[in-house]
Image: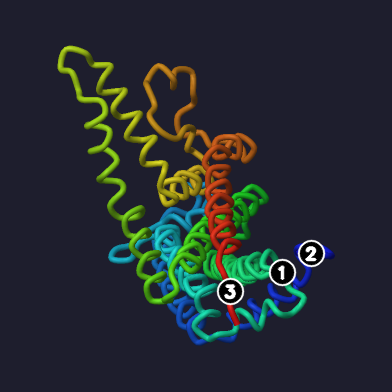
Amino acid sequence: MRREGSPFKGLSVVAFKEAADHMASPRMHLVMLLVILTAIGSIYGAIGQIKETVGQDPFLFLRLFTTARDPLPSFMAFLGFLLPLIGIALGFDAVNGEYSRRTMSRILSQPIYRDALLAGKFLGALMVIAICLVTLWLMISGMGILLLGLPPSGEEVLRSFAFLLTSLVYSGVWLAASMLFSTLFRAPATSALAALTLWLVLTLFWGMLAPLAAGAFVPIDPFDPSTAVHQAEIAHALARLSPSTLFGEVTLALLNPATRALGIIFYSQLQGAVMGAPLPFGQSAILIWPQLASLIAGMLVVYTIAYLSFQRQEIRA
């Protein structure tokens, strides 16, 4: 039967309804409490280290995100670990939860198409993550200004805001992955377990699997040194299949302005470069563009697969 009107009719209604449900859910409250507590702990530890180097670093504000103090890691490391969990927590029952509650046919009996339903659920959850990230960013900025007594420069604001957008895209990748599993499996527990398994493999074990796979593809010839370089390049390319690797490279270039290259660097490539000199924001943006574009493409590809899977499902009253 031919549909009339826009395929995204009701998109804003679904998106705001999902965002309101997430903001009021105890699940989201517990996750955000965990994130805020870890953020306060890591920032408090970082400020103690930064106060010892006042006047020695022109980017003290950015060091709030990268400085670690034992036994706590840096805020950047905490965020890279927790953002996938937030995305999974918001999306693992986005579709199959409607089937479990037997509300899917009731929703689609309204003037709301499947396109708008799935896109609204995705945008609603992404909206909640954006609100949480902006809140964290403002909280960290306020703590840094109050405790350090130094306002951030324009360069630091640009870099920290770019880090905020990168974190949103990174969490969107895992949100799309959890929604994909939510369309493939009818049981919410199964989709949550599948998403967590994928996260563990790509975050914790992929860094060990990539060199092994590269060694199998290109064995090192002791009489040909170029094979070792070729194997390292393949291992690095395979490691970039993990969103966490791409996120780590982007945040490294954004929050450490002295980063001049990502990946394998030869000494001949550094000749003439001023080592330790910070790059301007425009040069850092050019440096991270391939990784950021890969994260955006990954999010769109995974969401498209979830969309196609949802469109093929039969829905009965």
Q: Secondary structure at mark 2?
A: loop
Q: Nearer the viewer, residue 274 or 214?
A: 214
Left or right of 309: which side holds 73? left
Judged from this view, the residue extending furthest toward the left is 222
Mark 3: few/some/many CA within 10 Å (<14, 14-19, 20+): few
Left or right of 229: which side holds 303? right
Measured as percent of width and height from the top left, residue 19 is found at 64, 77
Judged from this view, the residue extending furthest toward the front is 1
Q: Amino acid at mark 2?
A: Arg
Measured as percent of width and height from the top left, residue 113 is found at 71, 69
Q: Nearer the viewer, residue 60 or 247?
A: 247
Residue at figure coordinates x 57%, y 67% from the top left:
133
Question: Which badge, 3 or 2, comes first in the chain's sequence?
Answer: 2
In the picture of the structure, the residue carrying the numbered disc 2 is 3
Residue 113, which numbered label? 1
Residue at figure coordinates x 61%, y 55% from the top left:
165
Question: Which badge, 3 or 1, comes first in the chain's sequence?
Answer: 1
Residue 208 image-quadrant placement: top left
User: Above or below — where is 282 with respect to 92?
Assistant: above
In the picture of the structure, the residue carrying the numbered disc 3 is 315
Q: Report the label total.
A: 3
Measure the C-alpha gap from mark 3 to mark 2: 17 Å
Measured as percent of width and height from the top left, residue 147 is found at 52, 69
Q: Locate the C terminus by quadrant.
A: bottom right
* Mark 1 or 2, closer to the camera: 2
Q: Nearer the viewer, residue 145 or 205?
A: 205
- Mark 1 and mark 2 residues within 8 Å of each other at the beta carbon: yes
User: Above or below — where is 191 with respect to 162?
Assistant: below
Q: Secondary structure at mark 3?
A: loop
